[in-house]
Image (cartoon, rainbow, N blue to C red):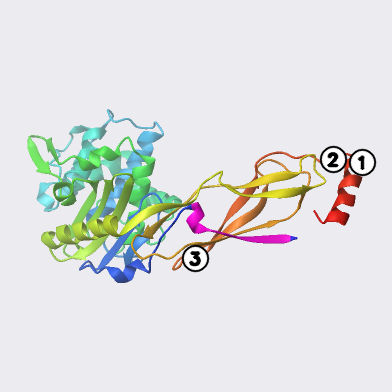
Amino acid sequence: MKFKYIVSSVVLSGVILGTNPALAMETQARNAILMDYDTGMYLYTKEAEKMVPPASMSKLMTVYVLFSKLKDGSLSLDDTFTVSENAWRKGGAASGGSTMFLNIGEQVKIEDLIKGILIQSGNDACIVVAENISGSEDEFVHEMDKYAYKLGLKNSSFANATGLPHPDHRMSVEDLAILARHIIKDFPEYYPIFSIKEFTYNNIKQGNRNPLLYSMNDADGLKTGHTEEAGFSLTASAKRGNRRLIEVMAGMSSNKERSEEAEKLMSWGFREFNNYEVLKAGQKIASVPVLLGKQETVDLVVAESVIRTLKKNKASKVKMTAEYDKPIKAPIKKGQQLGFVKIEIPGQPEFEVPLVATKDISEQGVFGKFIGNLKYLLEGH
């Protein structure tokens, strides 16, 4: 028979949570999202799925492709790329955009190009990377699209490697947050570059444009963006203690507003939310009788830990219901799913976590089965 057991959230974790966080915060940004890095949960969204001009924030996809080539060994940081006349004309000082001040024909180390992209936001550096990896910037865009699909970016369309204005070059702030999370997770060896505050190349020193690097001790990345069409934008991350948050904000009216709004949203996220372990992997939920087995009981434990980002100071208990058969008929294999815990958190979709057996239990022999069946008929267990 199927058995249901209401699991006490107080006994397990004492979790507290709150109401829809989107109603508790406002920002001047046209589009915004705040994500917890560990759980991937959204703490705040505003027009997050809308495709907007990402400006230089889309350089994050350019470096994701480059980081991937470095990680698979097809490139190294000491390799050099050649600066073409096209890269110099389209992305150099004469173009009027952000530049690394590269020279035609120059051989530039990949490590310097990465710093030129992330710290100086060099359009010329992006085009150099694109041309040397794929032969042309147009071909490199196909690489960007391929990786975007692989990462599950559903609202992104690329037209160049720089983020310069183009009607077909669009991303959502949600996609940018997902991309930022992948960069931090997939390339921890390169992520510290994002927090470098200045870089000098060809005797020209430029500072990192990320305002949070100067106003928040916890901030350590990622990338600003600005064009007339896009407004002032920012993809940022900060780590406080064991918690990391990622935010993306687009469409602000000034550098000052970008700095203030970004710090306000990030600080609110750290202040109002925390991560809680609702269930722990291996946690025992029940000891269940075994029918016709060589052992009388088997323990059911949680198959995987459940960690959720929840609002701090608006208490409401999580409801957890364990469901499993009782008794369970042998044979049983260790790790075999024998039930589940249904978890209900207000404001979030309910979900289930498997309950699994802790050990192998084989069937009894013929005589043991006879006695077991007789016992079950007479005693009901």
Mark 3, mark 1: which one is toward the viewer? 1
Residue 213: x %, y % from top left: 17, 47
- Mark 2: which amino acid? Gln
Q: Which residues are magenta?
A: 2-12
Label 3 and label 2: CA atoms lie apart by 42 Å
Outermost residue to the front: 379
Provide the residue designation for mark 2. 364
Query: CB under 8 Å between callouts 2 and 1?
Result: yes
- Mark 3: which amino acid? Pro
- Mark 1: which amino acid? Phe
Where disc 2 sits, the SS reads loop
Q: Residue at x 86, y 50 (%)?
A: 375
Residue 229: x %, y % from top left: 19, 65
Residue 231: x %, y % from top left: 18, 64
**Badge 3: residue crowd in 10 Å (few <14, some 14–19, many ≥20):** few
Q: Would residue 288 be found to the left or right of residue 348 on screen? A: right
Q: Residue at x 30, y 37 (%)?
A: 190
Q: Would residue 181 be found to the left or right of residue 381 on screen? A: left
Marked residue nearer the N-terminal end (3 or 1)? 3
Provide the residue designation for mark 1. 367
Mark 3, mark 2: which one is toward the viewer? 2
Which quarter of the figure has residue 274? bottom left
Residue 283: x %, y % from top left: 55, 46
